[in-house]
Amino acid sequence: MTIISDTEVAARAPYSTVLHKGEKLAIIDLGGNQAVDFLCYDAADPAKRYSAAVTIAAQRTIFLTTGSVLRTGEGAPLLTVVEDTCGRHDTIGGACSKESNSLRYGQHTRHQHACVENFLTEGAKWGLGKRDLVSNVNWYMNVPVEQDGTLGIVDGISAPGLRVELRAETDVLVLVSNCPQINNPCNGFDPTPVRMIVTGGDV
Amino acid sequence: MSTTSTTYGARDHARAQAGTVTEAMPAIPASTWPDPPPGIDPAKLVWAETVAGGGYTHKVLARGTELRLTDVEGDACAHLLLFNADQPWERLNVADTVKVQWNAYLGEAIALLSDQARVLATVVTDESGKHDALCGTSTVDGNIERYGDGSPHGTSPSGNALFTLAAAKHGLTPRDLPPSLSLFQGVHVEADGALSFTGSAGPGKSVVLRTELPVVVLIANVAHPLDPRPDYTVTPLRVLAQRSEPSTADSPQWTSSPEAQRAFENTADYLTARGLA
């Protein structure tokens, strides 16, 4: 196993990389309970991109864990979760934005940094824009759904050093926002760095 | 010689077809819809159409339009997408819709939110209660696997294929299509996160939406991706839209939650600055 890159993503910062088929990306929660907002695209044709809806309909559960397959809107596999020491991850909460912060917390949060800002900034490097942003994965974020439908971002179940590892099933562009949110418990009210390690396939 | 072997004969043949009535068709003008139900004023109708199972439709609607969707026979499934007609890069965001309103399920007084934290439409009346904001619509490959075909010209069209066509008629491409929501076939989230299909509420149920911005509406009436029935099962959807008024500060939609109220305030702020209200 060859380490291709090993990157510490600063608190509140974006990150992106291309994984070639067979390569793996480990996402390590260094400080504990740090939401990692995550989108992925077929690197050869970014119009083929992660679909939360298709992914959860195919696996018939809203949570991601070991064995989950992240699929495009067409149903094709992009990434497989090959290791998960946390237990479950969110597919339905989407990303924070300056705009949605204004609804959830009030207009005073309008100018706070947010995940959509990171996605737009980092996506622009790859020719992606606003229309390429869709419902994303939130690694390490805890969003239960009660039996009456009430859902919400609650205290996390992650801890320092827990990891998720993803295997690329094709060449995949990965877009990440290390979530800067400070108004809900998704980052323990204190955004921290995460570590991204890309390793080679078994060749 | 057949009657259509000449240009004159072919023209007469084509023209003689006018006036044919079929189940799945629009009434144009909409005010000529033959049997408006209670609560619908024919003079105010702007869209009146029946969409067959496996069909799609689309329209640009003014702000303040009441859009009534009816599951005529009990197995419609209206997959729905909304865009701000003035700037279609602003579109329905199902994640924000469920997260901001702290509720996984659609129902009365729920606001359908855009990614710009504004209200595209609200749910005014919901007789069904069987809806889904999580699973999106069906895919071509998924329908091939389930039913043998997922193409628009086949017998089991997928929602993705139909949304692609509907979107194209508004200058939009597959990249412009976010996850959709669906009405009239329910999905429930179990305590462990598992999804279960709860089916329909039966024939004749309606959902009334009110547009709060000028919107592009795309509708695909296709089997839900979790529908367990082996046969592609989807029955006609009735679409009746009439001119009405947008929500105001004293409407139950506006005051349903502090989050919805701020979304209406954001919407009013946009419309005011834009010179639309």
Image: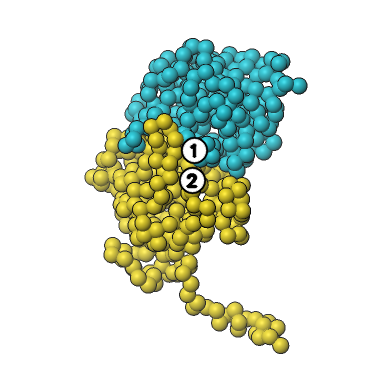
Chain colours: A cyan, B yellow
- Residue plotted at (52% across, 52% down): B230
Q: Residue A182 appears at what percent x and percent y?
A: 40, 20
Where is residue A67, by image quadrant?
Answer: top right
How many C-alpha atoms fall within 10 Å of the one at disc 1: few (<14), some, or many (≥20)?
some
Label 2 element class: loop
Q: Chain of mark 2?
A: B
Label 1 element class: loop
Where is residue B244, by image quadrant?
Answer: bottom left
Q: Residue furthest left?
A: B250
Image height of A140 relative to A102, above or below: above
Asked if badges 2 and 1 are on one and the same chain, I answer no
Q: Residue A148 appears at what percent x and percent y?
A: 32, 37
Number of numbered callouts drawn:
2
Residue A60 shows which numbered tag? 1
Q: Residue furthest bottom?
A: B1
Q: Chain of mark 1?
A: A
Q: Residue A107 appears at what percent x and percent y?
A: 35, 29
Q: For this view, does B159 lie left or right of residue B94? A: right
Pointers 2 and 1 in contact (C-beta within 8 Å): yes
Residue B226 shows which numbered tag? 2
- Residue plotted at (29% across, 42% down): B254
Q: Residue furthest front?
A: B230
How many C-alpha atoms fall within 10 Å of the one at disc 2: few (<14), some, or many (≥20)?
many
- Residue plotted at (35% across, 25% down): A108
Q: Nearer the viewer, residue B140 or A46?
A: B140
Q: For this view, does B142 lie left or right of residue B63? A: right
Q: Nearer the viewer, residue A160 or A177?
A: A160
Residue B100 shows which numbered tag? none
